[in-house]
């Protein structure tokens, strides 16, 4: 017994030592190695960070931006109104892409203008002075005749009717901005004016989107022009087309600007205070010759031709309709019209801050429903064309609101009828060609 127990005791003692030793090494090994590992990681951290930065940088470098710039024509006194617009477009879009910005002025920009705008733009800024010959009355213009007309237009209460500088601005935006040497290096542009509002996030590169889809002209808002400002613009355009029918695009959008196969202008135009476009279109022979023809006729000074109808007529006639795009996802306001995304999904996802009820896009005085029909795209339910049918049926059936299902049926049917008519007759249905005098700003 004592022999066994002493042997057992030796075993127990040996086992205890072994267990202790094992425990000791285990306890010390795991945390020790962990600590070392953590230490190593700690040491590596700056490197890891660096690697992340490098990966991030490479991502940025390998992202190929489009060949594009923002453009603002502005006076020095427009500075802080323009800064409002810059801040919004930077916050909603450009902080992700850092596109350049070109500022143009008929006078020298002040150091303050340059310093403040440079501070707000996340891309490079460029400042250009407009050459005198692009901002002066050509010698061929009869000044007395022009001034008499300005006085008359002023007396008639035509907007900017008496202003010489507004006329220079319209002529410059029509025929010269894209000739400024600073712009030689760029293809696409986005025009931004003072005091405009951008309501929604724009999480994608719109310039790449223009390139990928081969769009030459993009707009948010369309409407009818004041007839008093462009009395002879359409006839001058007709003369030009008579001389140069070769410039008409095969699949053009004449129906967008004329309801009677080119006899008369319907005053529809894209509102050019917002434009995303391809300057190569303005640089094309067709547009240069068109502008030259218009300019020689004197209408920029004898009347008050706006760059919006000039650009729009050219886009409708010299581009194929597939090259023009409506940005329904860009919430935008230039007084007094709001363009607010129609699709509730987009409104929510893009954090749009505009009131959809204020959306001008589908109202009657807008021409965007016409544009959708010509593009053979379904016109959204909010369009005045569908609303009057929905409300009409509701009134006929006891004045109660239609169920969402029935409303959808009415809208689908309305779209089908409009499209059938357009495809069969190659013109807009009569309900979309109201007499201009009957149009109300609703
Ligand atoms: N440099 C310069 N820019 C001008 C002049 N008049 C207007 N602009 C700019 O041209 C654009 C259109 O002018 P704006 O006053 O907004 O006209 P509206 O939008 O038609 O009422 C804006 O970007 C203005 O800053 C001018 O005389 N000189
Ligand atoms: Mg403006």
Image (tube, rainbow, N blue to C red):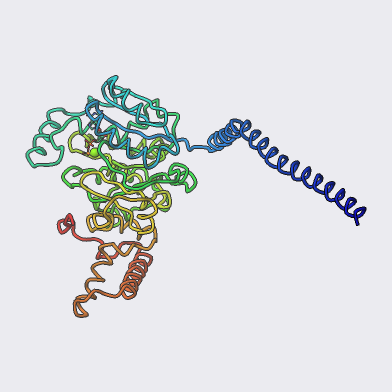
Left/right placement of residue 114 relative to residue 183 reads left
Q: Residue at x 39, y 49 (%)?
A: 324
| Residue in the foreground of this view, choosing between 321 and 389 | 389
Ligand 2 occupies quarter? top left
Instruction: Give the quadrant of residue 159.
Output: top left
| Residue in the foreground of this view, choosing between 433 and 100 | 100
Total number of numbered discs in the rendering: 0
Quadrant where the N terminus is found in the figure:
bottom right
Q: Is residue 434 above or below residue 207?
A: below
Q: Is residue 339 above or below residue 135?
A: below
Q: Residue placed farthest to the left in the image?
A: 155
Q: Residue at x 73, y 40 (%)?
A: 29
Q: Position of residue 83 (x, y in %)?
A: 29, 33
Instruction: Give the quadrant of residue 236.
Output: top left
Q: Is residue 199 above or below residue 387?
A: above
Q: Position of residue 297 (x, y in %)?
A: 24, 36
Q: Residue placed farthest to the bottom in the image?
A: 397
Q: Residue placed farthest to the front in the image?
A: 2
Q: Position of residue 302 (x, y in %)?
A: 17, 35
Quadrant where the C terminus is found in the figure:
bottom left
Left/right placement of residue 280 relative to residue 21 reads left
Q: Residue placed farthest to the right in the image?
A: 3
Q: Position of residue 332 (x, y in %)?
A: 30, 46
Q: Is residue 56 above or below residue 235?
A: above
């Amino acid at each position: 017994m004592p022999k066994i127990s002493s042997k057992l005791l030796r075993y127990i003692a040996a086992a205890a030592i072994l267990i202790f030793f094992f425990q000791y090494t285990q306890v010390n090994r795991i945390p020790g190695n962990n600590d070392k590992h953590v230490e190593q990681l700690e040491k590596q951290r700056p490197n890891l960070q660096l690697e992340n930065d490098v990966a991030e940088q490479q991502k940025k470098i390998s992202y190929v931006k489009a060949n594009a710039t923002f453009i603002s024509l502005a006076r020095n006194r427009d500075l802080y109104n323009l800064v409002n617009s810059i801040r919004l477009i930077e916050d909603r879009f450009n902080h992700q892409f850092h596109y350049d910005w070109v500022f143009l002025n008929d006078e020298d920009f002040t150091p303050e203008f340059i310093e403040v705008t440079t501070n707000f733009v996340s891309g490079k800024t460029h400042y250009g002075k407009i050459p005198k010959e692009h901002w002066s009355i050509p010698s061929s213009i009869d000044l007395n005749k022009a001034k008499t007309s300005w006085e008359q237009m002023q007396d008639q209460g035509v907007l900017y009717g008496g202003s010489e500088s507004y006329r220079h601005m319209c002529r410059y935006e029509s025929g010269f901005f894209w000739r400024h040497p600073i712009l030689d290096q760029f293809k696409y542009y986005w025009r931004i004016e003072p005091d405009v509002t951008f309501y929604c996030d724009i999480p994608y590169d719109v310039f790449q989107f223009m390139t990928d889809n081969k769009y030459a002209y993009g707009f948010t808002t369309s409407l009818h022009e004041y007839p008093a400002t462009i009395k002879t613009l359409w006839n001058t355009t007709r003369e030009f087309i008579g001389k140069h029918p070769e410039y008409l695009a095969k699949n053009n959008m004449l129906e967008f600007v004329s309801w009677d196969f080119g006899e008369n202008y319907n005053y529809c135009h894209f509102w050019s205070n917002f434009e995303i476009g391809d300057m190569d279109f303005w640089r094309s022979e067709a547009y240069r010759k068109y502008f030259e023809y218009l300019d020689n006729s004197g209408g920029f000074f004898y009347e008050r031709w706006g760059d919006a109808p000039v650009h729009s007529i050219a886009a409708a006639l010299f581009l194929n309709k597939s090259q023009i795009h409506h940005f329904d996802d860009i919430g935008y306001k230039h007084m007094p019209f709001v363009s607010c995304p129609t699709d509730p999904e987009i409104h929510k996802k893009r954090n749009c801050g505009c009131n959809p009820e204020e959306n001008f896009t589908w109202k009657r005085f807008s021409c965007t429903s016409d544009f959708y029909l010509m593009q053979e795209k379904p016109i959204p339910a909010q369009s005045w064309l569908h609303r009057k049918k929905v409300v009409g049926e509701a009134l006929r059936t006891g004045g109660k609101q239609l169920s969402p299902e029935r409303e959808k049926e009415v809208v689908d049917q309305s779209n089908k009828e409009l499209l059938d008519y357009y495809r069969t007759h190659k013109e807009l249905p009569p309900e979309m060609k109201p007499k201009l005098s009957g149009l109300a700003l609703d």
